[in-house]
């Protein structure tokens, strides 16, 4: 009687330990790369911001202010020092958790960012989830059934969504669902004016409503999220759909998929193999959209009076609020670095061909 080999349990743990060590080494290398990259972005943005036309002290003081008043404000903001000296002071302050003070909002930059980041993060995260669902489903359908009418409609959707401006689609949705059908709330922010926000835990109204059991606020927040999330989801789902369709079409024509067909594997199994081998390219598209929307959703935030980071940085740019602009860039850079690190780890988990 043929004996089945018994797996060596200690060797399995040893192999998993080596894999964990490799992952930790990879994380260490990426962090070491992030440090000079982060400092480079910080310095480049610091210098470029100060090359913008306009004087923040003059804007703050007003058009009819005396020259002495403007000079005093310039010194108070530290803008009278050389740029390199300003940068050194700024880095020291950042290392101590001080991102500066906004003279236009009269608040600490860190407080402003922490207050507005959850609003934008909630909006773009739910939008990415919707875009991912639309893109993967329609992309798979287009790749596996290219001659179906539904597949052709999906491709038309991809072309139309790619040519639409997000704010224009948002205005259409507002006209249809708020003005005409009256089933959507007024685009005046994250909640109705009379609704009291839930107790702040994460700053995201949906999550905080669930955690505190405030279901009335949950429903109200979900209604206000619906239109901006659908707008961003529909617009950005097209890019995910196109990438899924093109990569899956290429994979479905590959030798190993043809071999799987010859071996008699089911269509569902073949589709799952094709999707898994397409996810690496799709993840990069998701990362690009996600990091872009952190500040790129500014028009949607403006249309729906959302009060997130997009609106904040737009106001900072108009006021030449150097500290606020710099703080936003730091948050966006850190967000993108962490995001791409997570996506890299996910890629390695789903694709064994990628080495640490």
Image (spheres, rainbow, N blue to C red):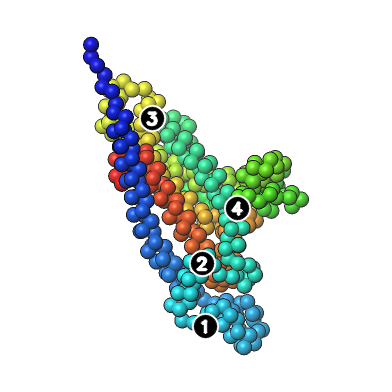
Task: Kindly identify which numbered label has been placed on residue 96.
Answer: 2
Whether the residues at callouts 1 and 3 have beta carbons within 8 Å, the answer is: no
* Residue 223 visible to an observer of this rendering: no
Quadrant in the picture for the N terminus: top left
Q: Between disc 4 and disc 1, whose residue precedes?
A: 1
Calculate the distance from the C-alpha at mark 2 to the C-alpha at mark 3: 51 Å
- Left or right of 261? Residue 188 is right
Report x, y in % for residue 282.
Answer: 40, 43
**What residue does disc 4 label?**
119
Closer to the chain start, of discs 1 and 3, is: 1
Residue density around tag 3, few if under 14, some if 14–19, many if 20 or more, within 10 Å: some
Secondary element under disc 2, as helix, strand or loop, is: loop
Q: Earlier in the sequence, mark 2 or mark 4?
A: 2
Cα separation, mark 4 vs mark 1, equals 35 Å
| Residue named by callout 3 | 271
* Viewer-nearest of discs 2 and 1: 2
Q: Earlier in the sequence, mark 2 or mark 1?
A: 1
Disc 2 from disc 1: Cα separation = 23 Å
Residue matched to label 1: 80
């Amino acid at each position: 009687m043929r004996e089945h080999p018994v797996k060596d349990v200690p060797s399995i743990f040893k192999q998993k330990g080596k894999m964990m060590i490799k992952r930790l080494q990879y994380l260490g290398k990426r962090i070491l790369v992030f440090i000079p990259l982060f400092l480079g972005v910080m310095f480049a943005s610091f210098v470029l911001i100060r090359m913008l036309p306009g004087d923040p002290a003059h804007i703050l003081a007003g058009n009819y202010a005396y020259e002495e008043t403007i000079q005093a404000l310039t010194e108070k903001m530290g803008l009278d020092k050389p740029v390199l000296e300003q940068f050194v002071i700024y880095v020291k302050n950042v290392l101590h958790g001080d991102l500066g003070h906004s003279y236009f909002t009269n608040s600490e930059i860190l407080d402003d960012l922490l207050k507005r980041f959850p609003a934008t993060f909630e909006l773009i995260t739910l939008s990415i989830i919707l875009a991912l669902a639309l893109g993967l489903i329609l992309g798979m359908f287009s790749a596996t059934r290219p001659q179906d009418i539904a597949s052709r409609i999906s491709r038309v959707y991809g072309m139309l969504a790619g040519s639409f401006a997000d704010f224009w689609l948002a205005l259409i949705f507002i006209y249809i669902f708020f003005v005409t059908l009256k089933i959507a709330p007024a685009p005046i922010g994250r909640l109705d004016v009379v609704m009291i926000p839930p107790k702040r835990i994460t700053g995201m109204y949906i999550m905080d409503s669930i955690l505190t059991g405030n279901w009335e606020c949950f429903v109200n927040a979900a209604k206000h999220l619906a239109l901006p999330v659908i707008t961003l989801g529909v617009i950005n789902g097209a890019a995910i759909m196109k990438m899924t369709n093109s990569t899956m079409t290429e994979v479905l024509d590959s030798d190993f998929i043809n071999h799987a067909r010859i071996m008699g594997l089911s269509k569902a199994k073949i589709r799952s193999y094709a999707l898994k081998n397409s996810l690496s390219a799709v993840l990069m598209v998701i990362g690009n959209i996600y990091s872009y929307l952190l500040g790129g959703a500014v028009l949607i935030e403006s249309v729906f009076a959302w009060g997130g980071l997009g609106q904040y940085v737009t106001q900072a740019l108009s006021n030449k609020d150097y500290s606020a602009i710099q703080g936003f860039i730091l948050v966006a850079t850190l967000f993108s670095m962490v995001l791409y690190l997570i996506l890299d780890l996910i890629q390695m988990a789903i694709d064994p061909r990628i080495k640490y």
